[in-house]
Amino acid sequence: MNSTERKPVYVAVYDTLADWETGHATAHLALAGFPVRTVGPTREPVTSIGGLRIQPDLALADVRPEDASLLILPGANDWNADGDPLAPFARTARAFLDAGVPVAAICGATAGLARAGLFDDRAHTSGAAEYLAATGYAGGDRYVEADAVTDGLLVTAGPTEPVAFAREIFRLLGAFDESVIDAWYRLFHDSDAQAYAELQQAGAR
């Protein structure tokens, strides 16, 4: 499959988004030929928790599941803010899943999906079980203590696991051969020097 056949990956961007949580996934998906597009509440610029100013490519209202390969939802302080200001992104996640398009949520975004009922019948993880329990959601018995979890079309991870999060996304989208994903994970997660050589060899073939 070449890049012209791959639909874009949509990355949600909003004020206070956690800069470190999506970089591994987006960088390597782009290298695999997936166009990456940012989606904001509107087209107005947003500012990450690290102070990066981002001009969204699209407004959330203009996003359609059928146009995308994946929706990525990073964490942000606003997922825990009064009034649930990012609830529209959780509703969009539901629309993606209902349409058979994958969703990947990390850190605070998992709380938003929990409140939206998307974990009630799906295995999932987050930063801590107690964090999600505080949302009052009904899916506590489906919580898994793991770096990252994939259940069907849904990937979840906690804030300290951007590498495991990316690995599950690569697998779900078939972005790379499994042997490449394994070597990549060992390099970036375990600092395995041998894995670097394996990746170099894979790139030469």
Image (cartoon, rainbow, N blue to C red):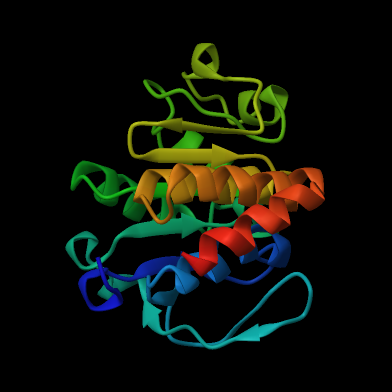
- Which of the 4 quarters of the picture holds residue 23? bottom right
Horizontal side of 166 relative to 51 (left or right) equals left
Residue found 79% across the figure and 73% down from its top: 50
Q: Is residue 93 above or below residue 29?
A: above
Res 40 visible: no
**Numbered disc total:** 0
- Which of the 4 quarters of the picture holds residue 171? top left
Residue found 41% across the figure and 85% down from its top: 57
Residue found 47% across the figure and 73% down from its top: 30
Horizontal side of 167 relative to 81 (left or right) equals left
Horizontal side of 63 relative to 150 (left or right) equals left
Q: Is residue 55 above or below residue 3?
A: below
Instruction: Identify the image quadrant of the N terminus.
Output: bottom left
Q: Position of residue 200 (x, y in %)?
A: 63, 64
Q: Position of residue 154 (x, y in %)?
A: 40, 39
Q: Position of residue 110 (x, y in %)?
A: 55, 41
Q: Position of residue 164 (x, y in %)?
A: 63, 43
Q: For this rendering, which residue is in front, 83 or 78? A: 78
Horizontal side of 70 relative to 21 (left or right) equals left
Q: For this rendering, which residue is in front, 195 or 122? A: 195
Q: Residue furthest top?
A: 141
Q: Is residue 46 above or below residue 120?
A: below
Residue found 47% across the figure and 19% down from its top: 138
